[in-house]
Image (tube, helix red, strand yellow):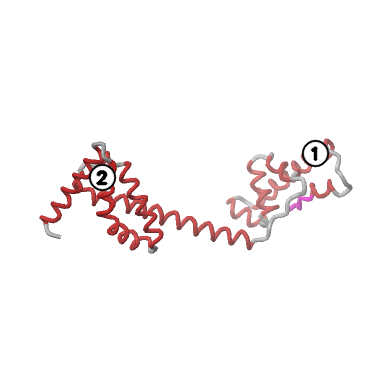
């Protein structure tokens, strides 16, 4: 494109931008027609998909329309529009990356053995009431199935501290569950046992 053509294009862009800002929003369609194909090609190269490019292009024009009053140089509308499109493309790429990461984590979660919960959640309720250091270890040991050595490594503390903390946590859980047993009579002889089955160190 020659300098003369570029200057003519910039002048036209400025005219339509100023028309939109001056109470003629319908004139924005001329800017859409002028740059729609260019923007689609630009975004398709970044996003690798026609459908994603069309979605991003539409969003780019919408943002440009509502932010037009912030455009300091109306004759540079094209460069400004490309900047908006680049930001939207980055947002789409980040969203896609997060979606893929979630799918990976979800697939791992589906493959992992599901934790066993007590039928009436009395045990989980008791665990939730523990102070954080005790609760953290109980969750790793009881539901995460981590060994004491693994917990010590993960929490960066001596093995002896882990075993002592777990012992105290078990004692607190037993006391809490016994209080629950006394206030709520079990519906069957085995009900109380299912709540209190926490394996120790």
* Residue topped by disc 1: 180
First in sequence: mark 1 vs mark 2: 2
Decide if residue 186 is on the left or right side of residue 4.
right
Image coordinates for residue 184, horizontal then vertical, percent: 83, 38
Quarter containing the N terminus: bottom left
Q: Main secondary structure of the magenta part?
A: loop
* Residue topped by disc 2: 27
Q: Is residue 199 magenta?
A: yes
Image coordinates for residue 88, horizontal then vertical, percent: 36, 52
Decide if residue 103 is on the left or right side of residue 47.
right
Decide if residue 59 is on the left or right side of residue 178.
left
Image coordinates for residue 164, horizontal then vertical, percent: 70, 47
Q: Residues within 10 Å of mark 1 (few under 14, many from 20)?
A: some
Q: CA distance from mark 1 to mark 2?
A: 72 Å
* Quadrant housing residue 106: bottom right
Mark 1–mark 2 CB contact (< 8 Å): no
**Where does the magenta region start and end?**
197-201
Mark 1 vs mark 2: give the one in front: 2
Tell me the SS state at disc 2: helix
Tell me the SS state at disc 1: helix
Decide if residue 160 is on the left or right side of residue 195.
left
Image coordinates for residue 180, horizontal then vertical, percent: 80, 38
């Amino acid at each position: 494109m020659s300098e003369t053509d570029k200057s003519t294009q910039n002048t036209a862009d400025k005219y339509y931008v100023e028309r939109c800002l001056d109470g003629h929003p319908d004139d924005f369609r001329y800017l859409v027609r002028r740059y729609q194909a260019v923007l689609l090609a630009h975004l398709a190269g970044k996003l690798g998909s026609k459908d994603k490019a069309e979605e991003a292009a539409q969003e780019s024009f919408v943002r440009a329309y509502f932010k037009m009053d912030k455009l300091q140089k109306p004759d540079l509308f094209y460069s400004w529009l490309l900047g908006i499109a680049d930001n939207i493309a980055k947002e789409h790429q980040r969203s896609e990356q997060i979606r893929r990461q979630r799918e990976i984590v979800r697939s791992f979660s589906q493959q992992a053995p599901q934790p066993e919960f007590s039928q009436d959640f009395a045990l989980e309720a008791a665990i939730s009431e523990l102070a954080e250091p005790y609760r953290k270890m109980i969750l790793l040991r009881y539901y995460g199935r981590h060994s004491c050595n693994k917990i010590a490594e993960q929490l960066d503390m001596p093995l002896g501290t882990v075993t002592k903390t777990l012992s105290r946590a078990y004692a607190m859980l037993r006391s809490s569950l016994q209080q629950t047993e006394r206030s709520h009579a079990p519906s069957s002889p085995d009900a109380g046992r299912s709540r209190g089955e926490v394996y120790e160190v």
